Image: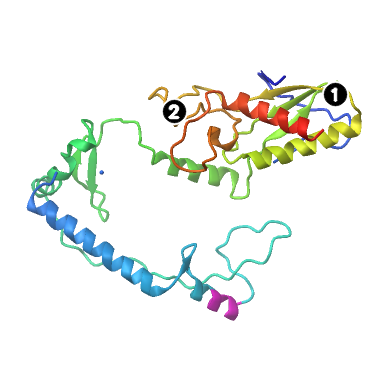
Amino acid sequence: MAEPVEEPSNRPSDPWGRIKNLKSKRNGSNTWQVVAGSAVLGLVVATGAVLAAGPWDNGQRKAERQLAAAEHPTGGVHHGRRLPGAPEPAPSAPAVLGALDTVTRSAPQDPASLRTALAPLIGAPELGTRVAASVVDAATGEQLYGRGAATPMTPASTVKIATATAALSALGPDHRIATTVRLSEDGRTLTLVGGGDPTLDTAALRSLATAAAKALGEDGDDPVRLAYDTSRYTGPVRHPIGKNPNIAPVTALMVDEGRLDDSDRGPADRSKDPAGDAARAFAAELTAAG
């Protein structure tokens, strides 16, 4: 029976002497109408330019990449670190877009004009009652307009960008979040240890179970107790908005993002106990693997 444990083994033993971890959105003033119309026109022009340029792949025209690869077979320098045994990286192509110019653009430079231009946008009721805005001169750093700019607020989900940047800086692009299996020192308890992997899916869990079952089988036919460990994360498991069928409790162990259907994107009902469900699925896969 799968049941939770609070702490992982800091020094997992391996009775086989081989495997310790198994991984896997009102209309407003004329100004607003002009701005909106210009934005739409600009989008249409930009889209046409992209389509005319040819197919793209990962931010680079395929034809450019192929040409660069043919002329410079020595490899590029903008592709990150190579993994051992990985193929040679494709060469870096020349920049598709030039650098931003330094031409001074005409724009309102006084608070009154800025308020007139921004009022229909910031005053939209769809933004709610707590709206903050700040317009800063990028050349001088002077704030030209501000509304609630000094009011502390919880950032919106764009904070994920800063989080991802910090993680990449601290851990590096090659870091992987592992889900592991550990065996107790007496060889009688197998623990599924969640590392926080948000991409863990059924196929990966099955592969992990198959490897664990094989290792256990090589040591004999004695039964083992299955437990699971979610101590990697601390703090609330629910978002402050409360229960939401499309948000599962945040734990260090879940499979298929806690989805209760076969979808892999969009809203879906989520598990109320994703870690327990993952452990039960792992137990079933262990049994199927003998």
Which image quadrant for residue 2? top right
184 sits to left or right of 131? right
In the rendered view, tell whether residue 70 sits above or below residue 138: below
* Lower position in the chain sequence, tag 1 or tag 2: 1
Q: Which residue is drawn at 20% across and 30% down?
A: 129
Label 2, residues with CA under 10 Å away: few <14, some 14-19, many ≥20: few
What is the CA distance from the residue labelled 1 to the residue labelled 2?
39 Å
For label 1, count other residues whose C-alpha is less than 10 Å away and answer few (under 14), some (14-19) or many (20+).
some
Of residue 29 and residue 160, the one placed in the foreground of this image is 29
Residue 109 in view of the camera: no
The residue type indicated by label 2 comes to Pro
Tell me the SS state at disc 1: loop
Q: Residue 273, can we see it?
A: yes
What label does residue 187 carry, if any?
Answer: 1
In the image: residue 83, left or right of residue 288: left
Residue plotted at (52% across, 23% down): 272
Give percent across and percent down for residue 257.
54, 36
Q: Does the magenta stretch include residue 69?
A: yes
Identify the image's colour scheme: rainbow, by chain, secondary structure or one colour: rainbow
Q: Which residue appears farthest toward the bottom when viewing the image?
A: 71
Tell me residue 7's x, y (percent).
68, 21
Q: Is residue 249 above or below residue 126?
A: above
Magenta range is 66-72
Write down the quadrant of residue 11 in the picture.
top right
Residue picked out by circle 2: 245
Q: Residue at x 22, y 47 (%)?
A: 135
- CB atoms at circles 1 and 2 under 8 Å apart? no
Horizontal and vertical percent position of residue 287: 77, 30
Magenta stretch contains residue 14: no
